[in-house]
């Protein structure tokens, strides 16, 4: 038996999620900011964290974007194999939802139609859409607007297996150090390990969707997460890059099987405004 | 530390007296300009065309605000990453620009121009666009309207909070700040949700 879902419902859901994600900082990040404020010994760092906490409250209350860089809309769709989308194209319905959400929410249009010609599309479309087909009859949509202050500081490297965990660790920390103040610390870092070139970057992006501070279920990966977090917070970069201990709120690692010849690593940098909102249709 | 209240536009003498780490509160007129507007300004200079604003003595805010809701002057309006303007900034400093507001590191070329001509680099809190928008009282597009968020806007600000990131002698808060705090954290990191 298949279950029918109207395209218009998808468009409306995406529009709602774009606004929710951009205006309402998720509770996990809110708590992480407050915990960081309690732990941060540097006065300059404390002041930045206080600004961010106040900013999030104001954004929620006045329906303003947490950050003016309302990002490129990254949309993750988990579509049950028993779902039939009717009334048009699912992909077009998602793009239409992004246009509607950004227009009605007074969110900034930050997308250019061509990376070289650079003319703004005016409605923040197109989105970057990732589809996953799963069992069942539900359609789950996650909208994760991604700002480019941090996206630009991201990096990917195809290591040889001989680089090992040391090579991986070094690369991640070098990326964090090189980013310095640019990605608006305190940062959240998504790390992908394994797969292929495109798979590893997707893993890094998906790692950003995990609740901040959650542990990878595999002990060796969680240990890596904890070691990386401690090392990031020992860089001294601190909130705003002004010096302090709370450089990163979380580092999440996700892994996938890979080739006998490879050890791909991707580091997706994100700021405290690691926005995502989900809905199940 | 007490904030130093300053009127915009800044005068050169004041700019020369500021030190990295100083907290300022700015009131007066600023102009927004980011990537695409910078590119056009430089193209205009290359072709000996007049600029849409008199740069001399002015301060640019590297920002592209969100659209304003009805009844408000502007939407969220925090700083963007300044480094993307590094290719253009020395030219504008040479033309008399005295202040830049943004976030993130600057190139040695920009810092050299700041030292040579006496310009200052100021930081607003990155990621606090909703908060900073409260200090913007008026906003008006004065050039390059077709660029949308990247158009040049004339902003009237009141008590706009910034910190001196790099002063006219080249002192850099992004170097001195982190150097003072680098080193292993004694206690278990506890930023996440437990």
Image (spheres, coloured by chain):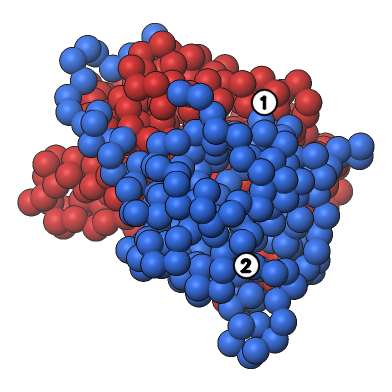
Chain colours: A red, B blue
Question: On residue A24, which mark appears?
Answer: 1
Which chain is disc 2 placed on? B
- In this rendered view, identify the residue nearer to me: A266 or A89: A266
- In this rendered view, identify the residue nearer to me: A134 or A281: A281
Residue positioned most to the bottom? B47
The count of marks equals: 2
Residue B42 appears left or right of B76: left
Taking the spot 92% from the left edge, 37% from the top edge, the residue there is: B71
| Location of mark 2 (residue) | B56
Percent coordinates x, y for residue A52 in the rendering:
55, 26
Dot 1 alpha-carbon crowd within 10 angstroms: few under 14, some 14 to 19, many 20 or more: many
Taking the spot 63% from the left edge, 26% from the top edge, the residue there is: A55
Q: Quadrant of the C terminus of chain B?
A: top left
- In this rendered view, identify the residue nearer to me: A7 or A159: A159
Residue B25 appears left or right of A177: right
Percent coordinates x, y for residue A107 in the rendering:
75, 44
Q: Quadrant of the N terminus of chain B?
A: top left
| Residue A168: quarter of image | top left
């Amino acid at each position: 038996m298949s279950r029918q879902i109207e395209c218009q419902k998808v468009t409306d859901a995406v529009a709602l999620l774009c606004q929710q994600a951009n205006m309402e900082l998720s509770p996990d990040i809110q708590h992480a900011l407050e915990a960081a404020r309690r732990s941060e010994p540097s006065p300059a760092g404390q002041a930045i964290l206080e600004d961010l906490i106040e900013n999030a409250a104001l954004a929620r209350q006045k329906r303003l974007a947490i950050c003016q860089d309302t990002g490129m809309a990254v949309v993750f769709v988990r579509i049950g194999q028993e779902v039939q989308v009717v009334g048009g194209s699912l992909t077009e319905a998602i793009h239409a939802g992004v246009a509607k959400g950004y227009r009605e929410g007074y969110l900034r249009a930050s997308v250019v139609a061509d990376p070289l010609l650079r003319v703004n599309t005016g409605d923040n479309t197109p989105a970057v859409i990732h589809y996953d087909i799963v069992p069942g009859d539900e359609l789950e949509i996650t909208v994760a607007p991604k700002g480019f202050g941090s996206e630009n500081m991201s990096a990917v490297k195809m290591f040889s297996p001989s680089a090992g965990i040391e090579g991986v660790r070094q690369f991640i920390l070098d990326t964090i150090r090189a980013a310095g103040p640019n990605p608006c610390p305190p940062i959240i870092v998504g790390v992908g390990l394994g797969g292929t070139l495109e798979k590893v970057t997707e893993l890094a992006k998906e790692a950003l969707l995990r609740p901040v501070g959650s542990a990878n279920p595999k002990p060796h990966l969680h240990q890596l997460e904890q070691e990386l977090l401690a090392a990031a917070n020992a860089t001294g970069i601190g909130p705003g890059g002004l010096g302090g201990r709370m450089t990163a709120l979380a580092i999440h690692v996700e892994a996938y099987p890979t080739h006998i010849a490879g050890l791909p690593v991707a580091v997706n940098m994100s700021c405290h405004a690691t926005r995502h909102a989900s809905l199940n249709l | 530390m007490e904030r130093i209240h300053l009127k915009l536009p800044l005068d050169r003498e004041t700019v020369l007296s500021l030190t990295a780490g100083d907290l300022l509160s700015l009131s007066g007129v600023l102009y927004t300009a980011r990537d695409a507007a910078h590119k056009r300004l430089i193209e205009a200079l290359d072709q000996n065309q007049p600029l849409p604003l008199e740069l001399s003595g002015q301060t640019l805010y590297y920002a592209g605000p969100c659209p304003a809701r009805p009844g408000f002057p502007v939407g969220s309006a925090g700083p963007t990453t300044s480094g993307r303007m590094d290719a253009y900034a020395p030219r504008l400093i040479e033309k008399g620009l005295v202040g830049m507001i943004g976030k993130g590191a600057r190139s040695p070329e920009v810092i050299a121009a700041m030292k040579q001509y006496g310009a200052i680099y100021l930081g607003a809190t990155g990621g606090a666009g909703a908060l900073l928008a409260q200090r913007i009282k008026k906003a008006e597009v004065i050039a390059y309207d077709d660029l949308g968020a990247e158009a040049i806007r004339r902003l009237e600000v009141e008590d706009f909070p910034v910190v001196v990131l790099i002063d006219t002698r080249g002192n850099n808060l992004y170097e001195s700040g982190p150097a003072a705090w680098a080193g292993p954290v004694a206690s278990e990191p506890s930023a996440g949700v437990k």
